[in-house]
Image (tube, helix red, strand yellow):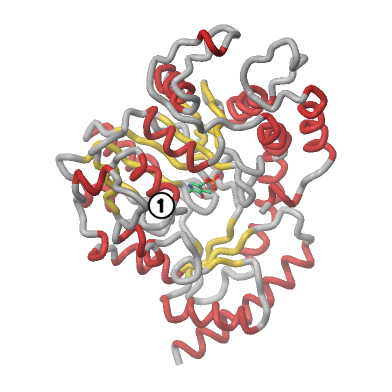
Amino acid sequence: MPGVEFFGAEEQKEVNDVMQTGILFRYNHDQQRQGIWKAREFEAEVCRFTGAKYAHAVSSGSTAVATALAAAGVGAGDEVIVPPFTYVASVEAVLFVGGIPVFAEIDETLCLSAEGIRKALTPKTKAILMVHMCGGMADMDGIMQIVKEKNLVLVEDAGQAYGASYKGTKVGLFGKTGCYSFDFFKIATAGEGGVLVTNDEQAYKHADSYSDHGHDHVGNNRGMEQHPIIGFNYRISELHAAVGVAQARRVPEVIRLNRKNKTLFASLLSDIPGVSFSKLADPEGDSATFLNILLPDTDSAKEVVRLMNEKGIAGFNYWYINMYHFINQWDHIKTLKSAAKLPIHLLGQSQDYTKLDLPKSQEVIGRLISFVVRCTWKEEEVRELATRVRSCIEEALTKVHA
Ligand SMILES: *Cc1c(COP(=O)(O)O)cnc(C)c1O
């Protein structure tokens, strides 16, 4: 959790700027705010760092995904290919904009694969919601080929991959729209917040209006603004944006430290027979927030997890059964339980979510144990942790494969 590992005077200074004027609203009040525009600064920093032409900050990564879908023109009745391994917000966002999620296979990149996407295509497929998982990136060449070939809309949920890139382009910028989360658990945090990015002016304008009741934000009199489209309130506050901008500026240094620690951690485990790591489609573009260890099979992974828990080793995620990021834990999604009717209840599903057949995804996530890489680790700490993890892996592999 690098974001919260570095927290100090810079964040306080940005917040204090806002507190001094008392203007917590991101728009208008031009006189009283004395030139303090934190949401704008946050967006400018994201543009500068990612190379995006436009960025728009909103209240969360989740509302950023919904905004990214809507701004890309994905809505009611549109089939959207989604992965079964993601933070559940990606799937919720598709449902809330009225789309029909269609689950496809991931592979060892931990992201949707070109092969998985091809198998899930139907004549009704409108879009792919590409989620870049665990700080890494999808294998974009193959995916872009399908997008072009089938004329699909690509939207990227890079919620946990701010700073990751593929062949020199930041993830989030391959699609019509993309987005990042700045919640409390990401590489940089705003407390709560998300940022949408795009190189498409029309998509940016729609995102800007969609996330603020349709306002066009032209002029400095909010009451007299035009409303080109229907929107809602997904605004970020100036206080959150203030924290976000200070944190976003730290990301290059966080990535540098993450990479150093991850490389050492991985090198201390890589010679164990049967152990491998998730595939980085572009190793140079890793944000290195996780070390993703792949065991030979689910039984060995479960045994490693049991041993690590027994020995008090912390800081890892076993998504297959323990975490809220894999479809096996999403009974409410599979049965479409909701407080009130959703568009999908009227439009119908394209897949029976209780009978999905995703053997590759089950196999990969069953074998996966992800360690959160801390950028503040000292070398001795990495060495000690690796030694302890190594002994659990060796003990588990001897036992399971005896
Ligand atoms: C964290 C995350 C989100 C949601 O972000 P919030 O800011 O928590 O709403 C969406 N998608 C992915 C892939 C995430 O990791």
Of the pair 288 and 223, the residue shown nearer to us: 223
* Disc 1 CB within 8 Å of nearest ligand 1 atom: no
Residue 321, percent across and down? 45, 71
Q: Residue furthest right?
A: 9
Judged from the image, the secondary structure of the residue bearing numbered disc 1 is loop
Q: Nearer the viewer, residue 159 or 346?
A: 346
- Which residue sits at x=42%, y=26%? 231
Q: Image quadrant for the N terminus?
A: bottom right
Label 1 neighbourhood size at 10 Å, few (<14), some (14-19), many (20+)? many
User: Does 198 sit above or below residue 292?
Assistant: above
Residue 337 point in image, percent of width and height: 33, 57
- Depicted 148 relative to depicted 381: above or below: above
Horizontal side of 294 relative to 100 (left or right) equals right
The quadrant holding residue 21 is: top right
User: Residue 211, image x and y in percent?
Assistant: 48, 28
The answer to which of 165 and 1 lies nearer the viewer is 1
Residue 177's place in the image compared with 317, above or below, is above
Q: At 54% across and 27% down in the image, what residue appears?
A: 56
* Side of 286 where 345 appears, left or right: left
Instruction: Give the residue number, with chain letter if any, for mark 1.
Output: 111
